[in-house]
């Protein structure tokens, strides 16, 4: 059975071990970062599936009611005319100002919420990968690995956590520039804890904001569904009420 | 000596001791989220320039950022690690508008929706049902009665909402009894005691960190707890360890509190609003069904 070729990360870990790194610890760092990413994706799927299902049903319901019930109710209105003759019908359903305002407002609010969430998600998005990189650097610094080699290996290993881990961080550069090995390793571990804290805060903020935002968007879509449900019915009753005021309506109440 | 004098004295000493750390503070300012950069930048500028007045003003607005500098002796290599530790927590005291933001947003949204419902939706249905002169179900009569009541009593409702917003602001901004405030206070106290700051001064500075009024160990009131007072009776090194443990307990409680808020208050609010909306929909839909049934 042919051997599986090593990934870039595995090669980097092998080199790091040859350079004095601790294989178990490095593999645990990578595995932990992967577990966090998996957990985030699973949580996002779980939290969005219900609002997405309700939203899609509401949109389908609104579209169905608008396209079908409008025609049916138009026919019913024609049937109540005296004599019952068909009236010209617009090719497209005409919407009043309130319906258009609600729909446009909802769309703008949804776009705004999405933009805000994207901004929140992208902020400090590199922190997790930078934390892994700092931890790897600290591990290699303790093993007397040359700084340049350690930096290359740390970038390769951290890239497994986030491909965008390559951009430099001034804090990491400052810590790496320390001459004293112990002080360098200690500051790198503190820097890793700092970035890990930022990442945890970002994830906590997202976990608070995403369900609320999704609920707001779905609430607005359901509101549009409600308006679509009421509009034709109100129009019908309104149209039937008008001739009743003027006199008798055949077949009416 | 007033609280401000205590702060000024310690900030002046910190700037004198740690002029060399200004560049690192600038790096930290660039690394934290954009909305948290202000306190760190002001601190870096004050330390770099040796400007005590600017430093005191910066420390008055965000005392937590200054605790590592105040509590660390010159030449102590742990200073940078402590700065990073302080920067990991979101600074308290983001200004009065930060606490008011959520209350304002909630009040505005609720007001706009109520206004739309009572001035646009309800009059349409009211006129429609009047045309038919039909006897309406009691649920519909109650719902329709909300419109005129809201139109007549909107100044009272607006005043109530403004009062509610101010009350919310007061609770969020002023209440020093919350677990997170106690955690911040006790953690800052631990750092200051470990750094050799006199207990009286440490209490004043820690109270500023937690945005709390001055505390008195003889009559402890949150954020100063009896556990913290008991810890202060030990020698400084042991007191710092004990205070850290007490702060950990408060942190755990704060996390538990926010979890309950997340899993209970949110769904409860959604269920309540859903129930109210559902009742309104049923109330307005029932007569329409009656009308269509009688017409057909």
Image (tube, rainbow, N blue to C red):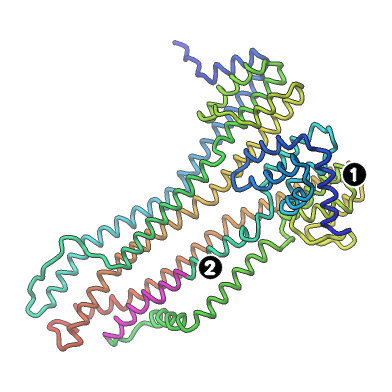
**Residue at the (71%, 42%) spot, across then down:** B45
Q: Which residues are magenta?
A: B112-132
Where does the image place residue B249, in percent across and percent down from the top left?
Answer: 75, 49
Give the chain letter at badge 2: B
Mark sitting on residue B107 = 2
**Chain ID, mark 1:** B
2 and 1 marks on the same chain: yes
Q: Relative to A226, is B86 above or below?
A: above
**Quadrant in which residue A222 is drawn:** bottom left
Q: Quadrant of residue A70?
A: bottom left
Q: Is residue B216 visible?
A: yes
Q: Which residue is mark 1?
A: B236
Residue B113's place in the image compared with B9, above or below, is: below
Residue B125 colored magenta? yes
Q: CA distance from mark 2 to mark 1?
A: 48 Å
Q: Is residue B241 magenta?
A: no
Mark 2 or 1 closer to N-term? Answer: 2
């Amino acid at each position: 059975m042919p051997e599986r070729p090593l990934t870039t990360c595995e090669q980097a870990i092998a080199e790091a071990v040859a350079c004095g790194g601790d294989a178990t610890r490095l593999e645990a760092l990578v595995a932990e970062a992967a577990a966090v990413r998996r957990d985030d994706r699973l949580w996002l799927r779980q939290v969005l599936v219900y609002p997405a299902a309700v939203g899609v049903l509401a949109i389908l319901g609104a579209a169905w009611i608008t396209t079908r019930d409008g025609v049916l109710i138009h026919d019913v209105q024609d049937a109540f005319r005296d004599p019952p003759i068909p009236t010209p019908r617009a090719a497209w359903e005409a919407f009043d100002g309130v319906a258009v305002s609600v729909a446009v407002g909802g769309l703008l609010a949804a776009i705004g919420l999405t933009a805000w969430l994207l901004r929140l998600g992208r902020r400090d998005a590199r922190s997790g990968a930078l934390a892994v990189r700092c931890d790897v650097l600290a591990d290699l610094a303790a093993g007397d690995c040359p700084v340049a080699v350690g930096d290359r290996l740390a970038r390769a290993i951290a890239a497994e956590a986030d491909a965008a881990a390559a951009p430099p961080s001034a804090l990491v550069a400052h810590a790496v520039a320390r001459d004293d090995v112990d002080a360098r390793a200690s500051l790198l571990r503190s820097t890793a804890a700092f970035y890990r804290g930022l990442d945890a805060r970002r994830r906590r903020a997202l976990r608070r904001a995403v369900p609320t935002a999704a609920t707001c968007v779905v609430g607005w879509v359901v509101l549009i569904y409600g308006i679509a449900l009421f509009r034709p019915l109100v129009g019908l009753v309104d149209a039937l009420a008008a001739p009743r005021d003027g006199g008798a309506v055949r077949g009416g109440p | 000596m007033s609280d401000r004098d205590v702060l000024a004295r310690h900030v002046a000493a910190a700037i004198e001791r740690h002029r060399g750390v200004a560049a690192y503070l600038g790096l930290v300012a660039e690394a934290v989220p954009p909305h948290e950069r202000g306190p760190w930048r002001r601190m870096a500028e004050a330390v770099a320039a040796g400007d005590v007045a600017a430093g005191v003003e910066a420390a008055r607005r965000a005392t937590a950022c200054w605790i590592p500098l105040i509590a660390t002796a010159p030449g102590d290599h742990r200073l940078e690690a402590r700065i990073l530790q302080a920067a990991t927590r979101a600074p308290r005291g983001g200004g009065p508008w930060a606490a008011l933001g959520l209350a304002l947003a909630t009040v505005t949204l609720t007001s706009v929706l109520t206004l739309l419902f009572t001035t646009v939706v309800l009059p349409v249905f009211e006129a429609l049902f009047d045309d038919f002169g039909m006897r309406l179900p009691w649920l519909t009569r109650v719902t329709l009665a909300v419109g005129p009541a809201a139109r007549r009593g909107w100044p009272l409702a607006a005043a109530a909402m403004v009062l509610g917003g101010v009350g919310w602001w007061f609770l969020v901004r002023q209440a020093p009894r919350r677990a997170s405030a106690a955690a911040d206070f006790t953690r800052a106290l631990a750092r200051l005691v470990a750094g050799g700051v006199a207990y009286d001064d440490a209490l004043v500075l820690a109270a500023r960190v937690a945005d709390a009024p001055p505390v008195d160990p003889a009559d402890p009131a949150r954020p100063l707890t009896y556990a913290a007072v008991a810890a202060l009776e030990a020698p400084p090194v042991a007191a710092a360890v004990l205070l850290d443990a007490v702060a950990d307990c408060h942190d755990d409680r704060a996390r538990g509190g926010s979890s309950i808020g997340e899993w209970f208050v949110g769904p409860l609010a959604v269920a309540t609003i859903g129930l109210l909306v559902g009742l309104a929909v049923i109330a307005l839909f029932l007569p329409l069904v009656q009308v269509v049934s009688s017409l057909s």
